[in-house]
Amino acid sequence: MTTWNVAEPTRLELKGEVKDLQVRLVGGRVNVVGADGPARVEVSAIGERPVTVTLDDDGVLRVTHGVIPRWPGFLWWLFHGRFKVDVSVMVPPRTPAKLTVVSGSVIVSSLRAGTQVDATSARVTLLGLDGRVTAKVISGSIEALTLDGEVDLETVSGEIVVADTTARKVHARAISGSITCDLDNPPVDTDVRLDTVSGEITARVREDSDLRVNLNATSGRVICAFPGLDRVGRSTVIGTLGAGTGRIAANATSGTITLLHRPVDPDDLDDLDEETA
């Protein structure tokens, strides 16, 4: 096992194989990228408290602040600057990753073996990920672009945006905040569930989608761009698109639900014809 105690801007080239990544930091900015080549850790700025980087014999890479303090609100805002760090980590694309951050921003891109992000107050950006992807934020936003696999996102207070994704499962939940979900070429067994207590939900699916649709706004209304679906008053729309092999369900306690359709790219139709020929 190799350990570095980093107290100043540093660039570490890791010679050992990295099979798993675990990041646990109090505050700052974290950027994790999946790329071929040797793994490395780069700390570009750091506060008063050092960061420990460890690569053990099993291939687990850890970047940590040690024990994360649980101070009351006032003391937290008074002292959390001491723990701030800007760190970038590059690991092989097939590395599973788990990141825990109290305050700051998190960017994760190009990982293919699953990613888990837990944050208290942060902005989370997920780009080009595959596998099981989960992100939970108490206060802050989640932006997820071009994801595949299974996606599970949750925020208590903040916005969730999912765009250009082909993920088979997309589950997004917000207590106070809006949800925007844009699906690109969903597979036949798509499972989309969007829930918010106080906020708007906007979903866009391909106009040739095969989905069972159930949209319900308890105190609000539902706007639907698919005329073939059944409307029950102002607050519920149900029905089936195409063969109905997948499903999309959206529920809002207070707010508007909007279901839109996106045109089909002719190139996608050509690829489908080639596959079925």
Image (cartoon, grey):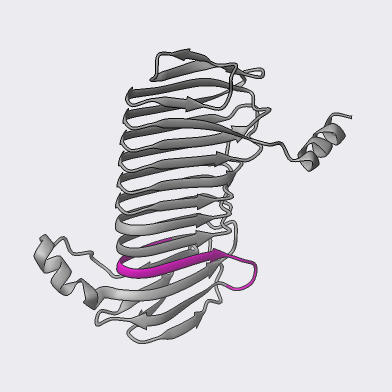
Q: Is residue 62 above or below residue 207?
A: below
Q: Is residue 143 visible?
A: yes
Relative depth, front residue between 148 and 143? 143
Q: Quadrant of residue 195?
A: top left
Q: Quadrant of residue 35?
A: bottom right
Residue 185, image x, y percentages? 66, 37
Q: Is residue 215 above or below residue 272?
A: above
* Left or right: 152 in relation to 253: right
Q: Is residue 169 above or below residue 87?
A: above
Q: Residue at x 15, y 66 (%)?
A: 76
* Left or right: 165 in relation to 102: right
Q: Residue at x 41, y 62 (%)?
A: 106
Bounds of the magenta segment = 22-38
Q: Residue furthest right?
A: 277
Residue 61, image x, y percentages? 45, 66
Q: Residue at x 55, y 66 (%)?
A: 91
Relative depth, front residue between 246 and 264? 264
Q: Quadrant of the C terminus?
A: top right
Q: How many marks?
A: 0
Residue 22, image x, y percentages? 41, 61
User: Does the segment drawn in magenta span residue 36?
Assistant: yes
Residue 271, image x, y percentages? 81, 39
Q: Residue at x 33, y 38 (%)?
A: 199
Relative depth, front residue between 65 and 226? 226
Q: Quadrant of the N terminus?
A: bottom left
Q: Is residue 151 above or below residue 66?
A: above
Q: Is residue 56 visible?
A: no
> Secondary structure of the magenta portion, mostly?
strand
